[in-house]
């Protein structure tokens, strides 16, 4: 915006720009003054001051207004090369020019100041809104597993309650599940902090995408037993030079998102193949898909689809986008014609086959 454009220049630079601009425009007008007349020159100089007021701070603009008025008087109002003005009409015109130039500079500066204050207020309101969203999400996502762990632990430690071996296993499973959920939220927060601080630097190495996909599935199959996970990757797919940890987290977040927000028994499929020196990774499901108005927003931080199930901080997909872009790639979401959502990730990556790698 205009307010930020001037902030990048020092006052001395702004004064220099304002003086040089007025002198340059005045010189151009002087060469054509016989054709356009001195009254037209006044309009051109006023327009110049108005343009400067859009980009510079108040004092350089006031300097341009005063300088343009003096130049107009000295070089253009008859008699030339003197500050004396012969008739009352020209005197009034000069005074009006001077007044209009100053008022224009001051009003434009006030408009810019008001605009800047409005932007700052909107920024503070958005920050507060994001903070409240995060706080509300975390109050649920962190307190719930913590309460589960405390309750299950109390039951295990209470001597007055006679627990069968089955009861103990169930309570232990609850603790493990709650701890896993708590760890996932902490990981998301840490990953978002890494993204926002700009410290993520991909460590590329030769990776088997099949192996990464099955690692994710093995981590999830016990926690989401109602969802079948299918890895549909050909055995002869080449090795990709990618960041193993980032790609694993990308697949993991997408698979978890699909498992959480699709009906029970919805099938989650992971696909991958090579296409023109790129890794193409697809995570899709046969659930209900996304509302059309949400497709462009799902990767925004803290965004959650309306009427979705309770829980979640709205960070998982924004982390996916950040990790993909950190590797120079892109991610898109689309609804499939037959139903369900499809995330497509494209990451530039060198490829090779195992037999070639052994010869390197």
Image (spheres, grey):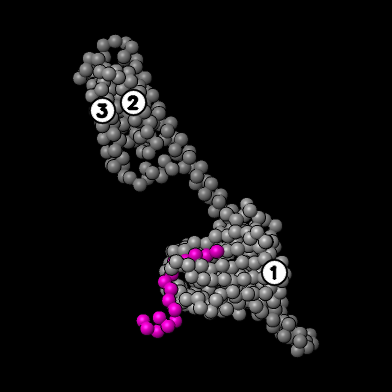
Q: Is residue 307 above or below residue 142?
A: above
Q: Is residue 314 above or below residue 265?
A: above
Q: Which residue is mark 3?
A: 28
Residue situated in front as seen by the camera: 200 or 266: 266
Residue situated in front as seen by the camera: 257 or 269: 269
Q: Would residue 130 be found to the left or right of residue 109 on screen? A: right
Q: Which corner quadrant holds the C terminus? A: bottom left
Q: Which residue is mark 1?
A: 266
Percent position of residue 351, x then y? 43, 73
Give the residue drawn at x 67%, y 66%.
Answer: 286
Q: Which badge, 1 or 2, is on the more N-terminal residue? A: 2
Give the residue drawn at x 38%, y 24%.
Answer: 100
Q: Is residue 202 above or below residue 67?
A: below
Percent position of residue 304, x then y? 63, 58
Q: Residues within 10 Å of mark 2 (few under 14, many from 20)?
A: some
Mark 3–mark 2 Cα distance, whole angstroms, equals 10 Å
Element class at badge 1: loop
Mark 1–mark 2 Cα distance, whole angstroms, equals 69 Å
Element class at badge 3: helix
Q: Would residue 52 be found to the left or right of residue 1 on screen? A: left
């Amino acid at each position: 915006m205009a307010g930020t454009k001037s902030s990048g220049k020092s006052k001395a630079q702004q004064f220099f720009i304002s003086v040089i601009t007025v002198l340059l425009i005045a010189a151009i007008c002087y060469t054509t003054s016989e054709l356009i007349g001195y009254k037209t020159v006044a309009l051109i100089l006023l327009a110049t001051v108005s343009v400067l007021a859009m980009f510079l701070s108040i004092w350089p603009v006031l300097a341009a207004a005063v300088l343009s008025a003096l130049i107009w008087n000295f070089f253009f109002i008859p008699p030339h090369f003197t500050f004396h003005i012969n008739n009352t009409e020209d005197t009034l015109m000069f005074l009006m020019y001077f007044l209009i130039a100053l008022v224009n500079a001051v009003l434009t500066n006030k408009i810019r100041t008001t605009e800047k204050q409005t932007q700052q207020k909107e920024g503070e309101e958005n920050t507060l809104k994001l903070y409240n969203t995060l706080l509300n999400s975390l109050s649920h996502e962190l307190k719930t597993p913590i309460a589960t762990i405390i309750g299950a632990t109390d039951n295990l430690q209470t001597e007055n309650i006679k627990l069968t071996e089955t009861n103990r296993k169930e309570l232990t499973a609850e603790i493990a599940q709650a701890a896993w959920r708590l760890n996932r939220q902490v990981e998301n927060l840490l990953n978002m902090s890494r993204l926002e601080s700009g410290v993520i630097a991909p460590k590329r190495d030769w990776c088997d995408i099949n192996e990464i996909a099955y690692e994710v599935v093995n981590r999830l199959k016990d926690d989401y037993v109602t969802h079948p996970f299918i890895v549909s990757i050909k055995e002869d797919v080449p090795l990709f030079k990618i960041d193993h940890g980032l790609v694993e987290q990308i697949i993991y977040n997408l698979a978890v998102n699909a498992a959480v927000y699709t009906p029970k028994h919805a099938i989650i499929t992971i696909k991958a193949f090579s296409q023109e020196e790129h890794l193409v990774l697809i995570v899709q499901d046969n659930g209900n898909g996304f509302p059309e108005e949400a497709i462009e927003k799902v990767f925004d931080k803290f965004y959650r689809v309306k009427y979705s199930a309770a829980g979640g901080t709205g960070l998982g997909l924004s982390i996916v986008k950040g990790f993909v872009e950190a590797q120079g790639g892109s991610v898109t979401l689309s609804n499939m014609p037959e139903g369900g959502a499809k995330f497509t990730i494209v990451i530039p990556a060198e490829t090779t086959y195992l037999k070639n790698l052994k010869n390197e």
